[in-house]
Every structure is written in structure tokens, then in C-alpha cells.
Image (cartoon, grey):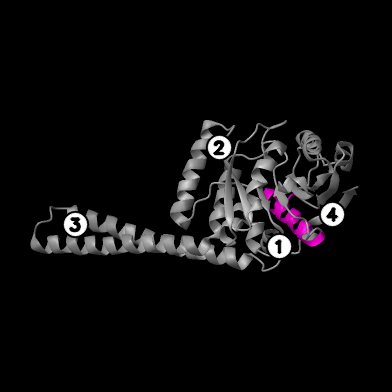
């Protein structure tokens, strides 16, 4: 039996996307009826707040969680997952998906199929195709390569995922969830299965994410693995520092042996000294950033502090 043949929860963050989310509600009901329990997290929308009537008119059961302010896509998901973990702990399956239609309701069946296996805790969607600009695709390739280089791990998935109850409970207890959902899954030690799924086009409107937002999103993923990044950057800097010391020693030896041309020695030594100092500065900055990230991340976050209202659709 496919897990969607029983009840399951759907957590979706929504920010100023009323038209697309309303259509998504209707399509979810058309596919799964009342088996889908929607946890819609309104991330501080002002112009297009999520209306409880949209859920009710679609025929769905669920809640609309209105936040006191805009906290960002990842924290909105964290709040939704914490709500499910506390109020619906026995839900057999929890889906995390965007509200714009790019994560299609029809693909949920395909996504949860590997959850039949007892050796799978989390299933993540790996995109077979993307409806994106060439600029975005190029940036995404660079980001994945940089992430693997700095952390030693591959990240090839986003927020579209399915969680078993034990996985949901573990993620809800992790502070990294509030920083980056996908990176939190990677560091959780859960058994993750990837599932190739096509990405659909947006139902309406345009993406709120710009280039700066994407860069910040990628940086937060790196910060989840701050210690790994620090070690790798430190190793690279150590090799560069050793090279500059060896090269400086060679330059001094050449100077003393009389093989250095006029002006060459001072230029070479000056460049090597600058490289050595920059290497030390980079190591220090990475160490400081790691300390700031870890010091600023609380061990436990009370998700209720962000919630302004919870409205139920029965």
C-alpha cells in the first residue's frame, strides 16, 4: 500500500502567494481527499495572507498557522514540522512541499513510494528536470560543487521530502533545522533515499527568491557544517602557508647564492609575505564565523513564540 492511501500531513510555508496556494489546496483534495492534513504556515504575509476559507472551500482538513512576522522560508518549515511533531506525533507520514505548485501534488505518490522500506527514514526529491533560467542552473551547479568541496558531502535536493514519524521527531529536536532544512537532513544521520522527480511550473506569480537570497540560502547550508568547513579551510591554508615558507626560503637561498636579478628578490618575497598573511586572515575569519554561528544558535527554540494564531479547518 502506498503511504498516501492513509492519512498524512503536508507542511507548506506560504508567503504572499495566495493564488498559487489556493490552487494547490484544490489539487491536493482532488488527488487525496481528506487524507491530506495541511499545515499551512503563513510566513507573515501582509498583502496576501492565507485565508482559512481557502482550505475549507477546497474540502481539506488542516490548520493555518499565522506567524507574528516574516521569519523566512526555512524557519517557517521548521515551525510547521515542530507543530506536527507536537500535535500529530502519530501521523504515519509528513510531506514538506512548497506552495507555488513547483512541487506537484501528483508527484507525492511517487515521492513516498520508497517509504515502504523499513530501512528508509526520509525520502528527498532529486530533480530530473527544472523549469529555471540558465543563470539559476549555472549558479546551482557552482553551489553544489562548492558545497561538496567545503563539506565533503553532496547536496542534490531541496525542501520537497517525506518523513517518517521517527525522522520528524529527530529533525524537530535539531537546532540546525532552523538554519537549513536540507542540510539538517544531511547531518541528522537518518537513512535518506533520493527519488528522481520532475519539477513543475509555478501555478501563479513569480518567485520571491532573488540572487542575494539564493546566495544567503547556500551560505546557511555551509554554516550547518561549520566545523567541517573550518577544518577543510584550515588544511588548505596550512598547505598554502607551508608553500609560501618554502618558497621564501628558496628565494632567500637564491639571493644569497647570487642568482637573483635586481628587484626580483624583494618583489617575490613581498608577494609571498602577502599570501602568507592573507592565508592566516582567512583561517582566523573562518574560525570567528564558526564561533559566531555556534554561539548564536540556541540549543532549543520554542516555535510557539513565533505563532500569532492557529486556525483549524475541520
Q: CA distance from mark 4 to mark 2?
A: 38 Å
206 sits to left or right of 7: left
- Tag 1 residue: 169
Q: Earlier in the sequence, mark 4 or mark 1?
A: 1
- Tag 3 residue: 265
Q: For label 3, count other residues whose C-alpha is less than 10 Å away and answer few (under 14), some (14-19) or many (20+).
A: some
Q: Which residues are magenta?
A: 70-87
- Tag 4 residue: 308
Q: Position of residue 36 (x, y in %)?
A: 79, 45
State which mark lies toward you, 4 or 3: 4
State which mark lies toward you, 4 or 1: 1
Q: Nearer the viewer, residue 55 or 71?
A: 55
Which quarter of the picture shows residue 165? bottom right
Q: Are marks 2 and 3 in contact (CB under 8 Å)?
A: no
Q: Earlier in the sequence, mark 4 or mark 3?
A: 3
Residue that extends furthest to the left in the rendered view of this protein: 258
Q: Are marks 1 and 3 in contact (CB under 8 Å)?
A: no
Q: Earlier in the sequence, mark 2 or mark 3?
A: 2
Q: Residue at x 77, y 56 (%)?
A: 91
Q: Residue at x 13, y 56 (%)?
A: 260
Q: Position of residue 228 (x, y in %)?
A: 48, 62
- Tag 2 residue: 128
Q: CA distance from mark 1 to mark 3?
A: 62 Å
Q: CA distance from mark 4 to mark 1?
A: 23 Å
Q: Nearer the viewer, residue 139 or 163?
A: 163
Element type at mark 4: strand
Q: Position of residue 258 (x, y in %)?
A: 8, 59
Element type at mark 1: helix
Q: CA distance from mark 2 to mark 3?
A: 55 Å
Amino acid at each position: 500500500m502506498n503511504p498516501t492511501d492513509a492519512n498524512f500531513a503536508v507542511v507548506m510555508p506560504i508567503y504572499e502567494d495566495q493564488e498559487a496556494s489556493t490552487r494547490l489546496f484544490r489539487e491536493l483534495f482532488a488527488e487525496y481527499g481528506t487524507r491530506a492534513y495541511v499545515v499551512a504556515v503563513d510566513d507573515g504575509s501582509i498583502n496576501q495572507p492565507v485565508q482559512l476559507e481557502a482550505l475549507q472551500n477546497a474540502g481539506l482538513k488542516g490548520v493555518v498557522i499565522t506567524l507574528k512576522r516574516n521569519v523566512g522560508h526555512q524557519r517557517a518549515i521548521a515551525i510547521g514540522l515542530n507543530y506536527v511533531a507536537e500535535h500529530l506525533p502519530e501521523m504515519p507520514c509528513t510531506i514538506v512541499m512548497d506552495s507555488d505548485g513547483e512541487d506537484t501534488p501528483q508527484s507525492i505518490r511517487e515521492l513516498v513510494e520508497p517509504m515502504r522500506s523499513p530501512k528508509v527514514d526520509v525520502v528527498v526529491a532529486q530533480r530530473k528536470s527544472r523549469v529555471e533560467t540558465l543563470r539559476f542552473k549555472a549558479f546551482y551547479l557552482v553551489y553544489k560543487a562548492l558545497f561538496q568541496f567545503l563539506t565533503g558531502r553532496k547536496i542534490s535536493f531541496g525542501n520537497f521530502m517525506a518523513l517518517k514519524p521517527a525522522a520528524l521527531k529527530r529533525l524537530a529536536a535539531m537546532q540546525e533545522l532552523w538554519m537549513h532544512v536540507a542540510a539538517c537532513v544531511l547531518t541528522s544521520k537518518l537513512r535518506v533515499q533520493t527519488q528522481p522527480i520532475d519539477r513543475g511550473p509555478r501555478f501563479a506569480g513569480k518567485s520571491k527568491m532573488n540572487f542575494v537570497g539564493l546566495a544567503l540560502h547556500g551560505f546557511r547550508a555551509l554554516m550547518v557544517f561549520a566545523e567541517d568547513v573550518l577544518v577543510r579551510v584550515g588544511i588548505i591554508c596550512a598547505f598554502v602557508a607551508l608553500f609560501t615558507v618554502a618558497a621564501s626560503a628558496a628565494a632567500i637561498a637564491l639571493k644569497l647564492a647570487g642568482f637573483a636579478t635586481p628587484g626580483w628578490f624583494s618583489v617575490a618575497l613581498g608577494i609571498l609575505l602577502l599570501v602568507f598573511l592573507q592565508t592566516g586572515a582567512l583561517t582566523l575569519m573562518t574560525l570567528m564565523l564558526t564561533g559566531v554561528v555556534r554561539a548564536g544558535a540556541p540549543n532549543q527554540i520554542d516555535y510557539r513564540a513565533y505563532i500569532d494564531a492557529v486556525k483549524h479547518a475541520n
